[in-house]
Amino acid sequence: MTNNIEIKGLCKQYPNFKLDNVSFNVPAGSIVGFVGENGAGKTTTIKAILDVARRDAGTITLMGRDNITDGPAARQDVGVVFDEISFHDWLRAPQIDKILGNIYKNWDSAYFFQMLGRFGLSEKVRKGTLKTFSRGMKMKLSLAAALAHHPKLLVLDEATSGLDPVVRDEILDIFLEFIGDEGNSILFSSHITSDIEKAADYLVFIHQGRIVLNAEKDLLLANYGMLRCDRATWETVDKAHVKGMRDTGYGIEALIDNRQDFRPAENMVVDKATVDDIMLLTIKGV
Amino acid sequence: MKGLLLKEFYSAGAYLKNFAIMLVIIIFFSVFTELGTTYVSMMMMMYLLVISISQYSIDEKSTWAPFSLCLPVKRVTIVGARYLFLLLLLVATMAFTFGLTAIVALVRGTEGWLPENLGILGVGTMLFLIVNSIIAPIVYKLGAEKARYAIMIVAMIPVLGAVLFSKQLTALLERFSGLNIPLLAAVAGVVAVAMYIGSMFLSARIYETREY
């Protein structure tokens, strides 16, 4: 399996924060959900991948090319969407088409407008300045611009945040379609774990600048479970497979990583864990 | 490079409405008051300076700067495109201003407008090159928002200098009156161009390590 992104030992030091030995891959043909709380290091990692922030140590390759020394060539195959549109408010879609059409070698103008049409941005709307666009429309335009040069890799930093569920669903469908080409892949950071749960093949969880979990999503959701019991029963639980717990006031909730093998005793319930549960309780620890 | 230049022109296009309003005011005052053709040249040069400086804050406001680093272009190309755009903007403004001044002079029947206005445009060009040479590296280093104060100081220095050292400046200008003015202007022009080129290399070097 080839990797469209390979990160090894990435370190980046800021006065109050550091990325500490971050390593993970984004395999071709997959969507990697990149999750973590605010300030965990998601955006810093993405900035380092795109060379918007320079790494202090480690290596990053995009489609096998170093992201700094061979950056411009590698970025011909990368589409990027940030949480805010990066174009000036008074630009119009046809102008964006002309700008990016003269930057990307593989820019496909017809596909760009086709995508806008598919996103429901009518010709009349497209002729207006971005100032007249809603947030959802701006994000759709950003996504169309990120896709119109037929990249192999999409990097999305909180691209679906602030969007309503209908728009998010449309965008997630586009992601799944994009990934239909086995050479393509997506690195997708989001606070909205339901989106990650729906679309991602792999889950990378970053906490305080360190990767604390990196696994296949289906395997993770199959193995992880939420154990609920009262305090007295909790004392009898073997803690070897407990990844995190919290006292709710009414009893104990614990994250276990052996749900399928776990045999619940009396007064215990074990349910499937969600990505939210995994995130929250991994942070809390045992 | 072409795509980046297009982006610069489209961004500057945002000023077209303001420019049209300003143009009406300039034409009115230059034709119907005593201000005359020199007013056209001075106002146009001032407006050009404002636009050139505003381009940086527009980029920062729209988060274009970090996005541009994700494009398949080298950082030096991004900086080079801005410097080239400013030069093209300068040339276009000069040509437009010259044409407009000629029309105003014809309407007013002004004689001897050419040398005076060529002088103003020449000084304006040098001022434009020097101011941008100083400001651009500061903006690339600090970002437009933080660089605002530095820009204000850069803009204030000549004004304060002129106010505080007006006597000395007058004496200096009297000394120059005996000199070969065209030669002096040519030397000043070469210095301004050299500063602009040097500034571009400095900005490119600064931007190579810039992070967002």
Image (cartoon, coloured by chain):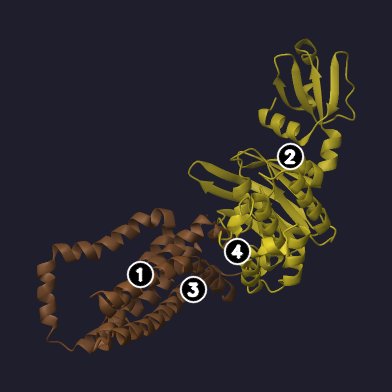
Chain colours: A yellow, B brown
Report the disc number at residue A68.
Answer: 4
Using the image, name the chain to which the residue with label 2 belongs. A
Residue pointed to by mark 2: A193
Dot 3: chain letter: B
Which badge, 2 or 4, comes first in the chain's sequence? 4
Element on which disc 3 rests: helix
Q: Quadrant of the C terminus of chain A?
A: top right
Q: Residues within 10 Å of mark 3 (few under 14, many from 20)?
A: some
Question: Which residue carries the number 3 mark?
Answer: B80
Task: Tell me the CA gap for discs 2 and 1.
Answer: 56 Å
Tell me the chain of label 1: B
Does any portion of residue A108 appear in the rendered image?
no
Q: Residues within 10 Å of mark 1 (few under 14, many from 20)?
A: few
Label pair 2/3, CB-CB below 8 angstroms: no
Residue at the far top in the pictured view: A232
The residue sitting at 71% across, 18% down in the picture is: A248
Q: Is residue A31 left or right of residue A68?
A: right
Kind of residue at badge 2: Thr
* Residue visible at 76% across and 21% down in the picture: A253
| Residues tagged by mark 2 and mark 4 found on one chain of the structure | yes
Q: Are marks 1 and 3 in contact (CB under 8 Å)?
A: no
Cα gap from disc 1 to disc 3, whole angstroms: 34 Å
Q: Which circle, 1 or 3, is nearer the viewer?
A: 1
User: Which dot marks residue B25?
Assistant: 1
Give the CA separation, mark 1 to mark 4: 50 Å
Residue type for callout 3 = Gly
Disc 4 versus disc 3: distance between alpha carbons? Answer: 19 Å
Q: Looking at the image, which residue is at 48% across and 69% down?
A: B16
